Image (tube, rainbow, N blue to C red):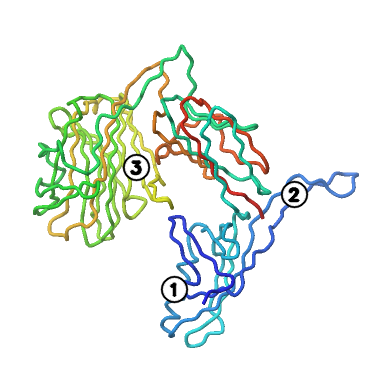
Amino acid sequence: MKSQYNFLIEYEDGERVDMDSVGLWVESFHIYSPNVVRKKSEIQGKHGATQTSSRLAERRIDINFQVETDSPMDLDDLKHTIYSIFYRDKPYKIIRDLTPSKYLFACQEGEYDFDNITSSDADFSITLTMLDPFIYGQKREMVINNPSAPFVLRNYGVEETPPYFSIELSGPTTLLDIIGEEDYMRIGRPSTVDDTTFKEYENVLTEDGFNLTGWTSALFTPDGGTKTGTMGVDSGNFIATGFGSGTNWHGPTLSKSLNGSVVIPDFKVRAYFDVGSNPSQRARTEVYLLDAASNVIGKVAAVLRKSSGEVDVEIALRNGSNVHYVVSMDWTYKEFFGYMDIIKKGKEFTFYIAQQGYRADGRVYTRHKPKFTFQDDNSEFQKSLAAIGMHIGTHSNYPTPTRAKIRKIEVEKINTQPEGIPFIGTTGDVFEFFHGESEIYKNGDLFYGKDFGARFFHLKPGENVFLANPPEVIREIRAEWRDKGT
């Protein structure tokens, strides 16, 4: 049986729920007209009023359901399932069978309950609110392979709609422009023939958990623990294949020198972790920064130490017994799937902690990325980086953790040119511009190099003409947008 007005809900994380599939038969689905709000002013001595502004306020959706189950127990279970379907902190996407190429955003407001209850059946009605009063229509796509020529994006809707651009580079550049008739988006800075351009970040090490080549037994001891057990790899992740035993933190610990045994005074270290939130287990994943003598000069860690299952995050700088914890806190999310950065530029340290997720197409992206800073005015933490260490551990006799992984480690040397202009990207890098969310990504990671005067814009109804710059470093531009109406 399939209801005439069936629809599905898609949440922010990509999960979908079809109403028919959970036993909810949609008897009616009614969207109220847009609520037009106009502000007016009266002018003395003149008839009527003058409109000063107008806008569309929120809209309402009334939905009636028939519920069919096999028993009173199933009916009660379904009632709780319905609650979990419609109650979410953020609006969710609704796609209807009647108009599968269109969608809207809504959320529950107010209460509801079952009516006409029998032993296993019932009816109920719910009201949803469209905080965003618009209905989004057909998805449009365009690939531009000739970036030196202007290109046209046509919005067939009746309202302005935000575009998405993906730009893949064919060479190094200090800036990217998307220039419209009235608006422009720019990242980076322009350079002249008199300027010195340079590569600010230069990769010197990437380890991604497919092998342990070059890794050796560590000379340092992990904080508050012992070196024991064995390290292995699993589908691109570093894992502990054995934790050994101990009364405190214990597990395998390895280290590796930077490529070419280089030593770098200014650097960026990024460590990717995947730590679950099983409250019966204890786990920690740690990446250590080491000097030429294998002394610890810094650390990033994701730790499951609480009976509640929350993961803690830690970032520390170190010089012998002098330890400064820049970050030591409960993580915003219960588990940790993301990365941590330590960036040193002279006496200025910058730290990021990023939670990642998966887009609907399976790509990993950064969804939350707080920033922390520290100024080393007394030059306490100025040792150069020479090697990287990693440790995966568990505590005493707790069950072996099932999700304690180091996904990847990247080390970059930071080059400086006081009067130079750095490249923002090079061959193969992909920049994404989400104008609806006011976000820019570089290779799936949030990018903060937007020009001060640039702004996120919308496509007007009809034709919108754009020009990309500089065309000689752009391999391809891909644009996406959706028609938007009421």
Identify residue type, mark 1: His
Q: Report which quarter residue 430 is drawn in.
A: top left
Q: Is residue 336 above or below residue 147?
A: below
Question: Are circles 2 and 3 on residues that touch, CB within 8 Å?
Answer: no
Which residue, as the protein is rendered here, is positioned at the far front? 145
Identify residue type, mark 3: Ile
- Which circle, 2 or 3, is nearer the viewer? 3
Q: Report which quarter residue 266 is drawn in.
A: top left
Residue 68 percent across, percent down from the top left: 49, 81
Instruction: Say few, some or many: other residues with alpha carbon within 10 Å of mark 1 (under 14 / 14 to 19 / 20 or more).
Output: few
69 or 144: which is nearer to us? Answer: 144
Q: What residue is shown with label 1?
A: 80
3D distance between C-alphas at marks 1 and 2:
43 Å
Q: What residue is shown with label 3?
A: 353
Q: Is residue 475 left or right of residue 103?
A: left
Sooner in the amino-acid sequence: mark 1 or mark 3 = 1
Q: Is residue 48 above or below residue 261?
A: below
Sooner in the amino-acid sequence: mark 2 or mark 3 = 2
Instruction: Say few, some or many: other residues with alpha carbon within 10 Å of mark 2 (under 14 / 14 to 19 / 20 or more).
Output: few
Question: Are circles 1 and 3 on residues that touch, CB within 8 Å?
Answer: no
The residue under the point 14% across, 50% down is 249
Residue 186 percent across, percent down from the top left: 52, 30
Q: What residue is shown with label 2?
A: 39
Viewport quadrant of the C terminus: bottom right
Identify residue type, mark 2: Lys
